[in-house]
């Protein structure tokens, strides 16, 4: 139990320091370090994320940093995709060995997308702001948001990763005029119904370890709190570089 609490604290600390979604850290940790099956690691992390992101959404709602019209567009694509991915897992058996291997590779791919988002999001945003003619508007912007939501919905349900750094990067590209606080608030807000539905789907599939979930939450709450307090005292570039290197090594280990 203590090991899980410490792990939850460590992940919470890194999330608080960097703002990267816990799934990028927690799911590989459970799979590689503790030998949890990929499907159970994904299901447990989704329940973990639904709980923690609900709290974050309340904070951002109070500070009015959620763009609800964007949240609705993302959910139009993400929620049906999450249901479809759950039914696909059900039809193939989430604990099936071949499916477990597929989930493992999906986790690795999602981790690498997170690395790309970590390293290049700032440059992508700068490029978009420097080329306003390339920015989508109106119906094209709305359609791209729905499609992006669908892709992330499937990714999150299968790998539990994608609603954090990847989702935030997509928001930056589609809505470059959003403030950093609005990007964070909107990203967290749409992730709540997405991770909740995905978690309920994994509960239906029998791939959530409730004891593991409880112990992880015990450690993560103080970890996120401490990380948030320390975030301004540690150079962001150093943290992102360290995290990107760590995640790259994790992805390589997952596919080896």
Image (spheres, rainbow, N blue to C red):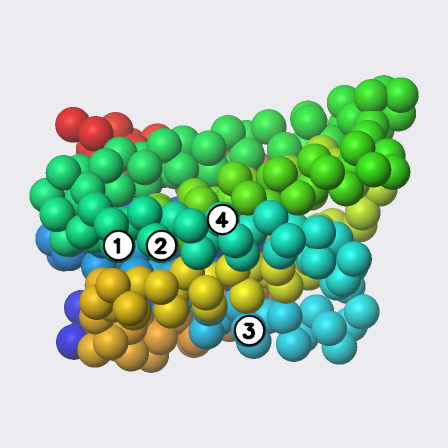
> N-terminal of the two: label 2 or label 3?
3
What is the tally of numbered marks visible in this picture?
4
Quadrant where the N terminus is found in the figure? bottom left
Circles 4 and 3, Cβ within 8 Å, touching? The answer is: no
Residue that badge 1 annotates: 90
Asked which secondary structure carries label 4, the reply is helix
Q: Would you say 138 lies left or right of 247 here?
A: right
Residue 207, quarter of picture:
bottom left
Q: Residue at x 88, y 25 (%)?
A: 132
> N-terminal of the two: label 4 or label 3?
3
Residue that badge 4 annotates: 81
Q: CA distance from mark 4 to mark 3?
A: 21 Å
Q: Residue at x 50, y 29 (%)?
A: 116
Q: Would you say 200 lies left or right of 176 here?
A: left
Q: Residue furthest front?
A: 91
Neighbor class of circle 4 (other Cα within 10 Å; few <14, some 14-19, many 20+) is many
In the foreground, 245 or 107: 107
Q: CA distance from mark 2 to mark 3?
A: 21 Å
| Residue 62 in picture, x, y percent from top left | 75, 77
Neighbor class of circle 1 (other Cα within 10 Å; few <14, some 14-19, many 20+) is some
Asked which secondary structure carries label 2, the reply is helix
Q: Residue at x 49, y 48 (%)?
A: 81
Residue that badge 2 annotates: 86
Asked which secondary structure carries label 1, the reply is helix
Q: CA distance from mark 1 to mark 4?
A: 14 Å
| Residue 246 in picture, x, y percent from top left | 34, 38
The label number, if any, that marks residue 54 in the structure image: 3
In the foreground, 39 or 109: 39
Q: CA distance from mark 3 to mark 1?
A: 26 Å
> N-terminal of the two: label 2 or label 4?
4
> N-terminal of the two: label 3 or label 1?
3
């Amino acid at each position: 139990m203590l090991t899980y609490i410490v792990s939850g604290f460590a992940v919470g600390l890194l999330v608080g320091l960097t703002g990267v979604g816990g799934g990028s850290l927690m799911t590989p940790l459970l799979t590689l370090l503790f030998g949890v099956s990929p499907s159970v690691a994904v299901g447990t992390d989704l329940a973990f994320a639904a709980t923690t992101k609900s709290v974050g959404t309340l904070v951002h709602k109070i500070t009015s940093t959620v763009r609800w019209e964007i949240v609705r567009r993302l959910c139009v694509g993400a929620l049906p995709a999450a249901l479809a991915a759950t039914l696909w897992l059900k039809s193939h058996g989430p604990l099936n060995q071949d499916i477990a291997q597929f989930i493992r590779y999906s986790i690795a791919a999602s981790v690498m997308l997170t690395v790309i988002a970590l390293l290049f999001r700032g440059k992508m945003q700068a490029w978009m702001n420097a080329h306003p003619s390339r920015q989508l508007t109106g119906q094209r912007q709305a359609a791209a948001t729905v499609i992006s939501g669908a892709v992330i919905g499937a990714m999150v349900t299968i790998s539990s990763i994608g609603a954090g750094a990847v989702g935030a990067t997509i928001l930056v590209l589609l809505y470059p005029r959003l403030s950093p606080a609005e990007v964070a608030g909107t990203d967290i807000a749409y992730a709540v119904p997405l991770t909740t539905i995905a978690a309920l789907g994994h509960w239906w599939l029998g791939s959530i370890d409730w004891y593991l979930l409880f112990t992880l939450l015990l450690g993560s709450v103080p970890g996120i709190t401490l990380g948030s307090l320390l975030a301004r005292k540690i150079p962001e570039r150093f943290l992102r570089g360290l995290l990107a290197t760590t995640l790259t090594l994790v992805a390589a280990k997952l596919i080896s």
